[in-house]
Image: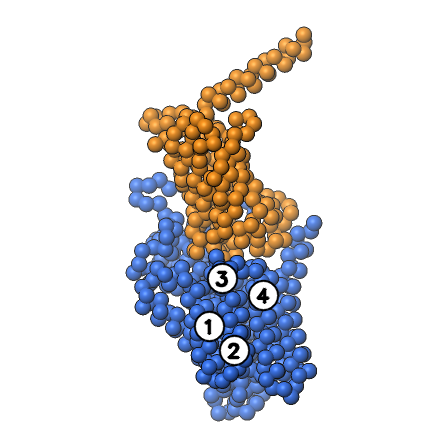
Chain colours: A blue, B orange
Amino acid sequence: MDHGARLPLYVLVRVVLVPAAAGALAVVAARLAAGRARVVTRLLIIGAALGACAAHLGLAGVPSLPPVDTIEWVPLGTAAATLFLLPGVGRRADLAALLAVLAGTACLVGKPVWSQASAPAAMMWIAAIAVGGALAVDGLRWSTERLATAAALFPLVATLVGASLACAAGHSVLVAMMLGGIAANVGALAVGGLVLGARDCGRGLLGVWVVAGAALVLYARLYDGLPTSVTMLLGASLVAPVAVAALPRFRGRSILAPILAAALALGGAAVARSVAAEKEGDAMVGQDAPTSHRVVAGDEAALGQLEPHPLHHVAERRPRLGNRSGAAAPGEPRAQPIRLGRR
Amino acid sequence: MTVLTKIMPLALLAAASASAAAANAPKAGTYTVDAVHSFTIFKIHHFGAGFVYGWFKETSGKFVVDADPRKSSLELTIKADSIDTHDAKRDEHLKSSSYFNAMQFPTITFKSTKVVPAADGQLEVTGDLTIRGKTKSVTAKVSPTGAGEDPQMKYRGGFEGHVTIDRNDFGLGFLPGALGDNVEVTLALEGVAQ
């Protein structure tokens, strides 16, 4: 069996083709249903949900019930967002549903960390994530009313790709591929919508993406050491279209708006890639303690060189998370590594 | 006659070795795993070509040796983030959510549920292996490796076990083309009698 040839195909199909196909099919179906606004909206929401979930299921498998690993809450949160936002019963009800799903997903994805942080700190983080996600959704929705839809979505695609590259270089390849899958899905819906004219970009569609993306980013941040700069960049990609839309000269469908947004996106992706390369460099230099795993593990000597864990200040106020220390206690012999093989 | 003279010394040597090994089997008692002299080593096929070897630097636990092997037991705790495969980048990848997710699941545990004597003085140790929060029953072939006293007059006993697990059973199935499904694990344990 040629294992080497099978791997690129695995990545291409599960990360790009399946999520993109889900989005493309939704756009085609929406085009065929043109004139029935509610049906179009729902078809696009389903396409987004299928794409985001396909990326997860294809790479991490079907989640166990109840989930064991908190990453398994991501597709369940996405499914919940779809379930609650699909009917589109009203603006306030949709907002309440979005906030509830965002808070619930953030709570469950970060549960091992929240349970060891103080209750007010955990609630503050969860509330911030929920409110931030809801603001992002409404900001993007507002910007799509003033700009071409693509101007709002392309920066998101590019920064998702940038974050995916950063995660890949930062060793969390699974999260990287999942973010790539969401990017492929958003891209397919953005391009397809541009070509076929199925451009509904409401709270439901954006909500599904933001729930899936925010849950993954939170997971990567808590358990995979996603750099702060990349997280900030992802946030900026949501704010950039709003900023462009707020400028008077870009109102209407000025051709400059998507160009400016695309430039922001490309710049963002480049920054994310350079951050990832820097992180990789750190890993190469610090052979024994290259990432936040070791930082949380209590290897205090590495703190001066490495980026702290996202909740490090929380960790400092509470006992260490379990007995995960990689360092030997004072007086305790430390096992010496034996070099056993070479890749 | 010629054949007998050739075979006899070998047979005697084999018999002597077997009896020496049997005589050196750890005596009954409870042993604490000596982390410094115990090793959890694994190997896995890489792209269908060579094998990648690695080990977990921190293994702890205890085992009970009983005159009736069925009453013997073994409990092990292995720190997931102590994995070492001779490449820092690969180790970080293995610790990440792609594989062991060591931040969320810091330990790998094994707890025996049944010990059965097998041929040649071996034991078949069946137990619950938990990796990344997923538990599955596995059976390891375990052999005594010897026993003796150290300079501090502490009685030590050793065992070596082998088990093959399917990584997909434990949520470690990411990138199926890059790595083989089966992981061969060797447990080389040395315990100090309590």
* In the depicted structure, whether residue A119 falls above or below residue A259: above
Viewed as shown, does residue A34 lie left or right of A242? Answer: right
Residue at the image position 57 percent from the left and 86 percent from the top: A148
Q: CA distance from mark 2 to mark 4?
A: 20 Å
Q: Are marks 1 and 4 on the same chain?
A: yes
Badge 3 sits on which subunit?
A
> Considering the numbered disc 2 on the image, is that residue within a helix, a strand or a loop?
helix
Seen from the viewer's position, the closer of residues A291 and B193 is B193
Seen from the viewer's position, the closer of residues B71 and A273 is B71
Q: Quadrant of residue A11?
A: bottom right
Q: CA distance from mark 1 to mark 4?
A: 20 Å
Q: Check if mark 2's residue and mark 4's residue have beta carbons within 8 Å.
A: no
Seen from the viewer's position, the closer of residues A239 and A202 is A202
Q: Residue B85: where, in percent of width, then height?
A: 51, 46
Q: Are marks 2 and 4 on the same chain?
A: yes
Amino acid beneath label 4:
Ala
Q: Check if mark 3's residue and mark 4's residue have beta carbons within 8 Å.
A: no
Amino acid beneath label 3:
Ile
**Can residue B114 be seen here?**
yes
Q: Earlier in the sequence, mark 3 or mark 2?
A: 3
Q: Earlier in the sequence, mark 1 or mark 4?
A: 4
> Considering the numbered disc 3 on the image, is that residue within a helix, a strand or a loop?
helix
Disc 3 target residue:
A71
> Considering the numbered disc 4 on the image, is that residue within a helix, a strand or a loop?
helix
Q: Quadrant of residue B103?
A: bottom left
* In the depicted structure, whether residue B88 falls above or below residue A278: above
Disc 2 target residue:
A85
Badge 1 sits on which subunit?
A
Disc 1 target residue:
A101
Q: CA distance from mark 1 to mark 3?
A: 15 Å
Q: CA distance from mark 3 to mark 2?
A: 22 Å
Disc 4 target residue:
A55
